[in-house]
Amino acid sequence: MNQSSKEQSLKKVLLLCGGRSGEHDVSLASARSVVSAAEASGTFQVQAIVISKEGKLLSLDASKHVLTEATAIPDSSELEHLSSLANYDFDIIFPLLHGPYGEDGTIQGLLELLDIPYVGSGVLGSAVGMDKIMMKAVYAAYGLPQVDYKAVLRSDWQAAPEAVLNDLETIPFPLFVKPANLGSSVGIGKARTRDELHVALDEAAKFDRRIIVEAGIRARELEVAVLGNDNPQASVVGEIAFESDFYDYETKYTDGKADLFIPAHISDDITQQCRNLAIEAFKAVDAAGIARVDFFLEEETNKLYLNEINTMPGFTATSMYPKLWEASGIPYPELIQRLINLGLDKA
């Protein structure tokens, strides 16, 4: 096969990256890794479109400049509306968007309306996976193990703070307070006292009208990567270890703040439990293609608790999701190719 024929047979992938969430820069880093892998492997063709923090598309040239030069987004003359996606030439879209306006079903709904194949979960799986309150309600309905939690509306907190605090204190301290719809540990606080809980609720309320409050336990943090559609497979189990109070934004994205152990140093029994629960969690929210499922392993009881599912996890070559699959025998370029095929199969 000559070079021209080979290029015509390769799948053409349009990456969407950046976006309106606080994980804009994380998304750009994921996209740079995928573009680099495509260039190195020659198994698929990639073009990338950067979405500005205001929700507009950069041109192909401007997007390439941002990704290769790591510079600021050009002025608005380079921007287009999201509906122009249908004008590009590609076989499938890889929406490498983390957090709100990308991982929450919004972009997936647009792509469904435009009848465009895409990698990852559909509207339902993305929306439920993003919203921590709905996610936990679904997992509770399926009988999956979780720590105690309560949901709080910002309007209730602002109207009757003492009543909310009294209700939340039925869960023993320490408590973790999180916005329901943000990723990357943004807006999360740990409370050991009523006063700290007050502060944490005020902080979380800055980011979301819905807040989740969870029991804090002494636990190891385990993660499993899931790959597939109707018959998903689970990777080896990994562990994240850190010395900070919890896995906050700084710890997550600062080199040297956390250690990854792949595979995790846990028993075969816990490993199998973890992998089985990951697949149950994946199916429960109707996820597809890609997801990372996070767990707590309580130190005192050795009991597993499901923490959350991420339907579009970080995807740099050194992110946990690709590293878990690499340790399971699927290298980074092959993993991307499998995700492309799964997206096409789903469509």
Image (tube, rainbow, N blue to C red):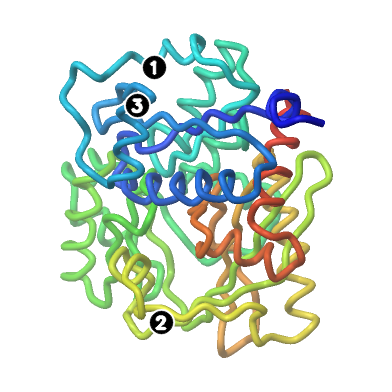
> Vertical placement of 168 versus 26: above or below?
below
Q: What residue type is labelled 1?
A: Leu
Q: In this view, does 339 lie above or below 124?
A: below
Q: Where is residue 127 in the image (x, y as percent from the top left)?
A: 52, 35
When asked about the image quadrant of residue 267, the answer is: bottom right
Residue shown at 47%/83% (left/top)?
Answer: 218
Asked if labels 1 and 2 touch by Cβ distance under 8 angstroms, the answer is no
Task: Indicate which disc, 1 or 3, sits on the residue closer to the N terminus.
Answer: 3
Q: What element carries label 2?
A: strand
Q: Which mark is residue 290?
A: none
Which residue does the image show at 53% across and 75% down from the upper left? 221
- Seen in the picture, residue 174 relative to 123 is either above or below; the reply is below
Nearer to us in this view, 232 or 131: 232
Q: Position of residue 135 (x, y in %)?
A: 55, 46
* Quarter of the image where the C terminus is located: top right
- Quadrant hosting residue 156: top left
Residue pointed to by mark 2: 242
Residue 337 lies left or right of residue 126; in this view the side is right
Q: Name the residue under label 3.
A: 61
Residue under pointer 1:
82
Q: Which one is closest to the eye, mark 1 or mark 3?
A: 3
